[in-house]
Image: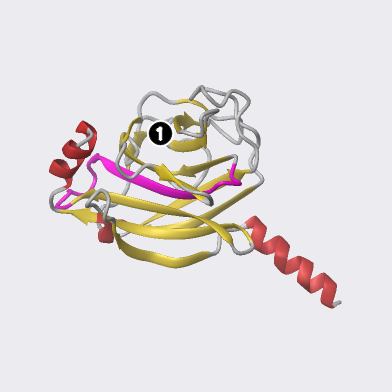
C-alpha cells in the first residue's frame, strides 16, 4: 500500500508542474531588467526557471513586446513554453542547444496535439548579455515580438494581461532535436508538461525600451 502511494505521488509530480518561488521578483544584474520569475519542476528536485519582463504602462488588450529568460539544467534536451497555457493554437517558444552548445530558439505553433510547426508571427532576438552557461545550467535571454498576442482560428485576437496572472505551460524532453543546428528541426515528443500562473504585473520595467535597445546592440 505504501509503495502504491509513493509511486502515485511520483507519477503526480511528473505529470504536472510544481511551482517553487512562485512569481518571485528577480532583478537581473546582467541585463538590468526586472523579471517576474517562476520555477517549475520537470522531475523531483529538478526544475527550470522561467522569467518574463515587459514594459511598464502597457494598456490591456494590446500587443506588447516581452523579454523571456530561462535557466535550464544541462540534462534538458529541449524545453518549451506555451504562452496561453496549452499546446494548441498559441505561440510556443522552444529552446535547445546546438552542436556547439549554443542556444537555439524556435518559434512554433501547433494546430492541435500534433508536432508544432514553424510560426512566423513571433520573432526572437537573442541577447548576448544574459545568455550564458556553466557546468550545471544554461541560460538564454531574448526579446519576443508576437508572444503576447495572436489570432485564433476564428479570426479573434487574444492578448495576455499585463496587469495580472496569465496561465502558461511548459514541456520538456531529455532528447535534443534531430537537427539541433536548425531552428526548424523536428523535435522529439515531450516527456513531461505542466502549468502555472505567471504574474505579469511584477514584470513591468519603466526603462524597458532603452534597456532592450542596449541589449540588442550588444553593449
Most frequent secondary structure within the magenta stretch: loop
Part of the protein shown in magenta: 56-76
For disc 1, the marked residue is 152
Q: x, y (%) of residue 207? A: 13, 49
What is the tally of numbered marks visible in this picture? Answer: 1
- The single residue placed furthest to the bottom in the displayed view is 2
Q: Is residue 182 above or below residue 215?
A: above
Task: Determine the residue positioned at 29% across, 41% down.
Answer: 129
The residue located at (28%, 55%) in the rendering is: 28
At mark 1, the secondary structure is: loop
**What percent of the width, then of the height, locates residue 126?**
34, 34
Instruction: Give the x, y percent position of residue 175.
Output: 65, 37
The answer to whether 163 is drawn above or below residue 109 in the figure is: below
Residue 71 included in the magenta stretch of the image: yes
Residue closer to the observer: 46 or 101: 101
- Horizontal arrangement in the rendering, residue 124 relative to residue 73 (left or right): left
Left or right of residue 11, residue 92 in this image: left
Amino acid at each position: 500500500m505504501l509503495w502504491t502511494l509513493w509511486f502515485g505521488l511520483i507519477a503526480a509530480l511528473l505529470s504536472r508542474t510544481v511551482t517553487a518561488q512562485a512569481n518571485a521578483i528577480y532583478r537581473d544584474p546582467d541585463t538590468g531588467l526586472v523579471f517576474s520569475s517562476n520555477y517549475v519542476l520537470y522531475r523531483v528536485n529538478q526544475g527550470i526557471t522561467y522569467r518574463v519582463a515587459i514594459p511598464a504602462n502597457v494598456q490591456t488588450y494590446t500587443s506588447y513586446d516581452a523579454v523571456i529568460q530561462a535557466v535550464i539544467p544541462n540534462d534538458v534536451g529541449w524545453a518549451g513554453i506555451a504562452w496561453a497555457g496549452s499546446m494548441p493554437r498559441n505561440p510556443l517558444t522552444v529552446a535547445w542547444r546546438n552542436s556547439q552548445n549554443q542556444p537555439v530558439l524556435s518559434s512554433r505553433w501547433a494546430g492541435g496535439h500534433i508536432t508544432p510547426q514553424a510560426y512566423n508571427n513571433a520573432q526572437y532576438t537573442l541577447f548576448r548579455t544574459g545568455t550564458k552557461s556553466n557546468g550545471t545550467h544554461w541560460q538564454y535571454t531574448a526579446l519576443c515580438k508576437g508572444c503576447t498576442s495572436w489570432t485564433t482560428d476564428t479570426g479573434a485576437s487574444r492578448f495576455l494581461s499585463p496587469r495580472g496572472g496569465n496561465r502558461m505551460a511548459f514541456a520538456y524532453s531529455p532528447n535534443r532535436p534531430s537537427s539541433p543546428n536548425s531552428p526548424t528541426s523536428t523535435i522529439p515528443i515531450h516527456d513531461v508538461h505542466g502549468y502555472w500562473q505567471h504574474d505579469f504585473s511584477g514584470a513591468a520595467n519603466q526603462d524597458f525600451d532603452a534597456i532592450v535597445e542596449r541589449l540588442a546592440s550588444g553593449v
